[in-house]
Amino acid sequence: MLWAAILVTIIVFYPVNAVAALLLAPYLAWVSFAAALYMSIWRRNRSKPMLQGAR
């Protein structure tokens, strides 16, 4: 959802101010990297049982 919102913002900003739109590209790259990292960690840990006493 955040990724789509950033992409739409870039598309809407581009006709108004191309520099402002292009300055959002690193943010989109960072959000993409963070999402990939999160999914990788989640996938590797989803099958591990929780510790006793942990909620």
Image (cartoon, grey):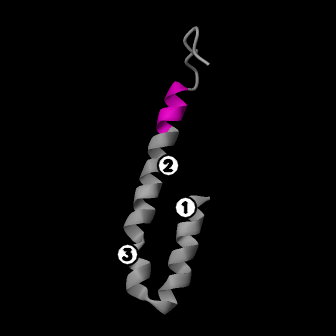
For the residues bearing labels 1 and 2, Cβ distance under 8 angstroms: yes
Q: Is residue 1 shown left or right of residue 17?
A: right
Real-space CA distance between mark 3 and mark 1, rounded to the nearest whole angstrom: 15 Å
Location of the N terminus by quadrant is bottom right
Q: Secondary structure at mark 3?
A: helix
The answer to whether 33 is drawn above or below residue 40 in the figure is below
Asked whether residue 46 is drawn in magenta, I would say no
The answer to whether 13 is drawn above or below residue 53 in the figure is below
Main SS category, magenta section: helix
Magenta highlight range: 40-45
Asked whether residue 41 is drawn in magenta, I would say yes
Mark 2 or mark 3, which is nearer the start of the sequence?
3
Residue type at mark 2: give it.
Ala
> Mark 2: few, some, or many residues within 10 Å (few <14, many ≥20)?
few
Real-space CA distance between mark 3 and mark 2, rounded to the nearest whole angstrom: 20 Å
Q: In the image, what residue occupies the spot 49% across and 41% down? A: 38
Residue type at mark 1: give it.
Trp
Label 3: which residue?
Answer: 23
- Residue 40: give x, y in percent of width and height: 48, 37
- Residue 42: give x, y in percent of width and height: 53, 33
Q: Quadrant of residue 12?
A: bottom right
Label 1: which residue?
Answer: 3
The answer to whether 44 is drawn above or below residue 29 in the figure is above
Real-space CA distance between mark 1 and mark 2, rounded to the nearest whole angstrom: 9 Å
- Residue 18: give x, y in percent of width and height: 42, 87
Q: Residue furthest bottom?
A: 16
Label 2: which residue?
Answer: 35
Foreground pick, 13 / 37: 13
Q: In the image, what residue occupies the spot 50% across and 28% down? A: 44
Q: Quadrant of residue 43?
A: top right
Q: Secondary structure at mark 2?
A: helix
